Image (cartoon, helix red, strand yellow):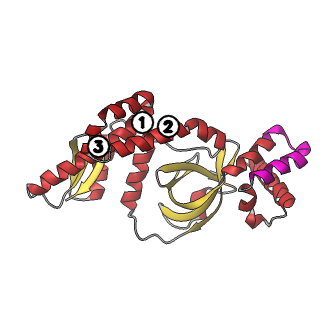
Amino acid sequence: MHLSPAQREEFTYLNERLSRFAGLDPTRMEDAYANPELIERFIREEGAELTDAQKQAVRNFVGYKKGHFYLVKQYKKYAVLLQQNTLYGVVGVDQAPAEMVDQGLPVYMEAALLPFNDTIVMTSSTVCENGTVSRSDIEYEFKQIKDVRGITETLDPQLLEEQTSPAAQAAEQELRQYLRTAATREKHAGDIKKILDQYPELHDVYMQMYSKISARTIKKDLKACGVRERHFAVYHNSVVAVAPTRGELLEQLSDLSFDGVMGQCALFRL
């Protein structure tokens, strides 16, 4: 998916005007995006020729993001990029992101993302070498994050703040600390309950971490019994899938399809 002709025209118009105002080569526009004061000065001095919607679109440019991503999927609506624990739904300027690469997905790349109205636009991309993460690992992580967190469709700073408040982010970090081990989970049981009561949206994170703790114990017990050459998936405190290869394990989990639970499983191999 890419911008419509009308969207592309407006997108190009705003970037060209900002580039001229800032005295920047178009290849250095990230210097402008990273300068909120410059953008506000541009709006003050050039705003008479811009609509209110165009002014807001330029203000949102400060949500610009550049880094390394995995281009994992190409849907009709947008492509999906994976970075750490976040999925981004992005469109291209004049062609679909998957059309910018000449190989099958997933692809590791450096990309630049810019918020524009209600979309995230991938303004540039460069395919990079990646020899450390397997395709099955990337696809599993994609499914896990999609089930638990969904796909982020905006880089609008205000909308992102509304979706995930600093308080909720701090609560999630605290919850993860309490769930590092079975001992810390038991010690902070009351604190965990308070967090989940206040932020019920963190239940998925709780289940993810609980499964990881259980997986450590289950792995230790199975290893002591002499079990070898198998891949396991644990949900909560139960083994829900076993297979000789990781790929087959992921297929089993995909077939189970039990309402987002796949994203809350912990995997291990003996």
Residue type beneath disc 2: Ala
Q: Quadrant of residue 38?
A: bottom right
Residue bearing the label numbered 2: 168
Tell me residue 155's x, y (percent): 63, 46
Residue type beneath disc 1: Leu
Disc 2, disc 1: CB below 8 Å? yes
Q: Give me the C-alpha separation between circle 3 and circle 1.
A: 18 Å
What segment carries the magenta color? 36-53
Task: Return the mark for residue 202.
Answer: 1
Left or right relative to 64: residue 35: right
Task: Give the mark nearest the N terminus, 2 or 1.
Answer: 2
Task: Give the mark nearest the N terminus, 3 or 2.
Answer: 2
Left or right relative to 133: residue 240: left
**How crowded is the residue under tag 2: few (<14 C-alpha within 10 Å), some, or many (20+)?**
some
Tell me residue 95's x, y (percent): 65, 57
> Can the viewer see residue 17?
yes
Residue at point 19%, 59% (across, down): 270
